[in-house]
Amino acid sequence: MIRALPCLIAIALASAGCSMDSFLFNTLPLESYALSTAVIPSANRTEVTLTSGDETLYGFFVRQPDSLRIEPHPTVLYHHGNKHNIQEYWDRVELLYRAGFDVFIYDYRGYGMSTGTSSEDGMKSDAAAALNYLRSRPDVDTSQIVDYGYSLGGFACLYSATVLHRPKAVITESIFASSEALVQSGTILNIPGGYLMEGAFDNRAQIVKVSSPILMLHGTGDTFVGYEANGMVLSALAPQPKIIRPIDGANHTTIPATMGLESYIELVTTFIRGR
Amino acid sequence: MKTDIHARFVSAAVLTGIVMSVLIGCSAVQPVRVLDKGASAITASLGGAVVPSSTPTGLVPYLTGGYAYGASDDVTVHARTHLTMAAFGVAGLEAGASVRAMRQNQAIPELTLGMQLLGFVSIARTAPARLYPNLSANASWSVGESSLAYLGSHLTLQLDPWRGLISPFAGYQFSVSNSVRLQVETIWQASNVDTRFGVFEGESSIGGSGSFGIYLGGVIAL
């Protein structure tokens, strides 16, 4: 048996090549979206289809009524987190709508009704497709686009804000420093991310290239994307001008609720309008 | 479409569950009791975190295989390889010893202490090696002539930064032939860790802590 063990290991290693990049992508495909109309009336949202490479993406453009539009009128490009699809983040869209902004939220490939399989490169392509859509709309002032990235969406957000264009402002919420930092803070022990993942999702390398004003939110009680290993690291790396807001007691999903919804809206509004 | 959704979920659950399992470094405790001096056995363990939200409830297939040898009447040395991790290009090996601290006396259980060192090295990618000491203790009772009921706990240590994970377990081992014993073990992995926002977002936790797992084990006497 002792002699057989190395053989077993060799056989197993010969089949090596799996990765856990899909760990990041907690997708939930849909046949149709069911979104609340309590805050955003159906008339004020448009379901949009985009082409990203060979894939078809779905998104929603939310537009303020003409009577409430204040020029210049910022549009928030919302890059959502890793869970399920747009429906999971619709309450966040509602908050930004209540704050007076137009919002575009889209599902990455593999999410919701979007086709394909999620990947690091796919997210880059999808972020570009989303930005191109906003640029194509005559009612969007391209100098007033704000990139907002939540959790996994921080990767698409920073890619958009550093490679695709120079946005009016950038907001990050609960984003991770890299796939390695995420694996370590989201699991139990200090396992190297490289054991299990191919993609680097290296937000540390991107955030130093941000040239727009940036607001960074992170809950100090976040036990999924730990503040010390992620939020603090990125906050230190981000260039000025930057506003760093650790939210005491907030976990990964509760920053607006912990701050108070009105305080959250005021902070975001002041940051964006003040630029 | 439904099948596709299910497949995606199970795939994600399996992969994330592998992380949970390997990080805690657990599999069915083996040997439950030390072997006789000079005896040897092949051991295997399959199981991991339970994913209650999948249908049917999913078990993460974390597989280990190993070897145990009775170095003396009270000490058994053993080694094990983490075969599932090998699929990711990571060599996972553990070696250790189990010591009989106290023999069973009527209702007073036999007490077995274990010490293992778990090591992981990535072959497929560039990543640093990791070592995790693991201590275990279990109390076992003979049930009839060929079965054991046991309970105990692991203490898995992370060295840098320092962290200790407590994983209590309970199981039952029974003979199916003169040389083959099977066991079923339930475990509350990392019971002292808040996992509400971790890999399963609390879905396999007990009250928001740790992860509930089930392992099946087998021991073949050589």
Image (cartoon, helix red, strand yellow):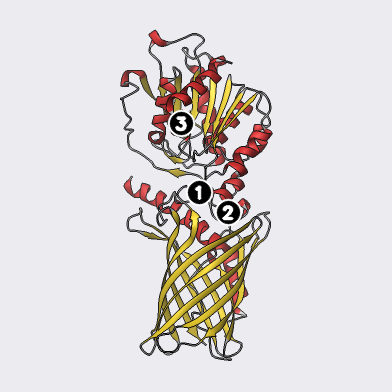
**Residue type at numbered disc 2:** Leu
- The image quadrant of residue A159 is top right
Label 1 neighbourhood size at 10 Å, few (<14), some (14-19), many (20+)? Answer: many
Image x and y of residue A212, in percent: 63, 22
Position of the C terminus of chain A, as image quadrant, is top right
Q: Identify the residue under disc 1.
A: A23
Q: Residue at x 58, y 63 (%)?
A: B86
The chain identifier of the residue carrying mark 3 reads A
**Which dot, 3 or 2, sits closer to the camera?**
3
Residue A165 in view, yes or no: yes
Image x and y of residue A111, in percent: 43, 38
Both labels 2 and 1 in a single chain: yes
Image x and y of residue A70, in percent: 46, 9
- Does A4 appear above or below A124? below
Q: Specify the label residue A256 is tagged with.
A: 3
B75 sits to left or right of A56? right
Image x and y of residue B3, in percent: 34, 50
Q: Are marks 2 and 1 in contact (CB under 8 Å)?
A: yes
Distance in Å between CA atoms under marks 3 and 1: 26 Å
Between A110 and A105, the residue placed more toward the observer is: A105
Q: Specify the label residue A196 is tagged with.
A: 2
Q: Are marks 3 and 1 in contact (CB under 8 Å)?
A: no
